Image (tube, rainbow, N blue to C red):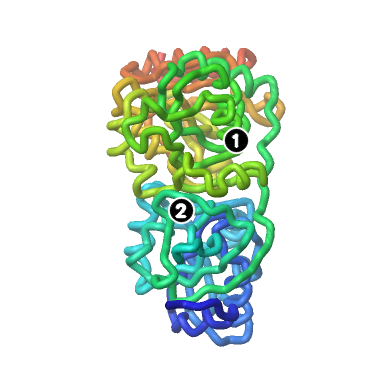
Amino acid sequence: MAVSASADAVLQHIRPHSDLVVPLANGEPTLLLDTIEAAAERGDITGVAVHQMHALRDRPYLHGAYPDRLRHVSYFLSHVTRPCYLAGTVDLVPNHFSEVFSHMNGRTNDPLIIAAAAPPDRHGYFSLGVSADYTSSFIGRARFFLEVNANMPRTFGRNQIHVSQVAGWVQNDHPLVEIPPPAMDRLDHTIAGFVADRIPDGACLQTGIGAIPNAIMSALAHHRDLGVHTELLSDGLVDLVEQGAVNGVRKLHNRTKVVGTFALGTQRLYDFLHENTAIELWSARYVNDPRLLSRERNFVSINATLSVDFLGQCASETLGGRYYSSSGGQVDFARGAMYSEGGQGFIVLHSTAAGGSVSRIVPQFGVGEVVTNSKNTVDKVVTEFGVAELRSKTVRERATALIAIAHPEHRDHLTAEAKRLGYV
């Protein structure tokens, strides 16, 4: 049975050319990674790869400080890893979030999972806290070394690991990184109204990250019997539960429970999650599985994108032809909503960018732009000017509907381009 050790003990479990798996966001074990970086600086480790989605903390190794000793393989770029990827010091694996575990499992050889965790309970079980993500799928399949943080919420679901199952653990108490909800403007609330009006009582929701999804959650306060089955648990969820709008009583899976795979927000959210039996964190393999989502009635997926072309394709992970993030779970949930009885998939965005000078409804994508959500999957696209219903529509009908929700100042140009392309 593992006992608490010094952080240097983790180095005993790292061999040359080892693979390390690190949870996303606040699941990152800061002291353990500090220790591993120090070992790389000394030359005590070599050829080690760190596999992680969405890193929150900047580190020298991300910038190529120890290129032959410690390198980073990303599965979703963050504000920290984005410039490193563009500089060539970080690699990126394209993926759907539901498949990240299988990608990591296939790419790694006897990986060591290093993760932050809540302190063990009286039965000897650690909780992986705010990040079940892909990490929880390795329980019983890989070696674990944990960093216990007294400030990590103890959460429930399929994210428990017994002290007998870990190679070691270390104590390191520090506050979790807080991400305040983005400020919402008039356009966000207008878009939220269009979406909320189309969501029935009893629907099961997935919402992405950003100002528009947050505005939509705030617009659902007077709905009833909503369920939540989403990858990200954010501060907007707390209000909906406390207002009684979310209770999950009409869900088919995990009835009465709010289900997510990771949480990121403010201390209010983390306090709400701590020992809250109404909240369950499951692996992304389960939460994001389109096959499971398709069996949930009235499943509603809500995600933001960066631009939409006349066919309905969504470019959600590149900006100006350069990688900005990755696919995440957008396609997982859009596919699940597509096959759900009564399901709806919403793609939300402002009609313009750059102070109104750039239309985000475009005739065609530029060179280097990556299609995240395909034209065959996209259901409804929403801007501040309305809703474009694309499911089962012809190319001509799609282009016409999308031009109708573009900013009026860009519609003449877009119409001319649609005619040039033979779409209208």
In the rendered image, residue 384, in percent from the top left (x then y), is placed at: 59, 18
Identify the residue under disc 1. Answer: 210
Q: Nearer the viewer, residue 283 or 51?
A: 283
Q: Residue at x 46, y 77 (%)?
A: 2
Is 183 on the left or on the right of 108, as rendered? right
Identity, as a three-letter code, of the amino acid under mark 1? Gly
Give amino acid for label 2: Ala
Callout in the foreground (2, 1): 2
Per the rendering, the mark at residue 393 is none
Q: Quadrant of the N terminus?
A: bottom left
SS of the residue under disc 1: loop
Which residue matches tag 2?
132
Percent x, y of residue 249: 39, 27
- The residue sitting at 56% across, 75% down in the picture is 67
Query: Can I make out residue 13 in this image?
Result: yes
Within 10 Å of disc 1 (Cα), the crowding (few <14, some 14-19, many 20+) is some
The single residue placed furthest to the front in the displayed view is 122
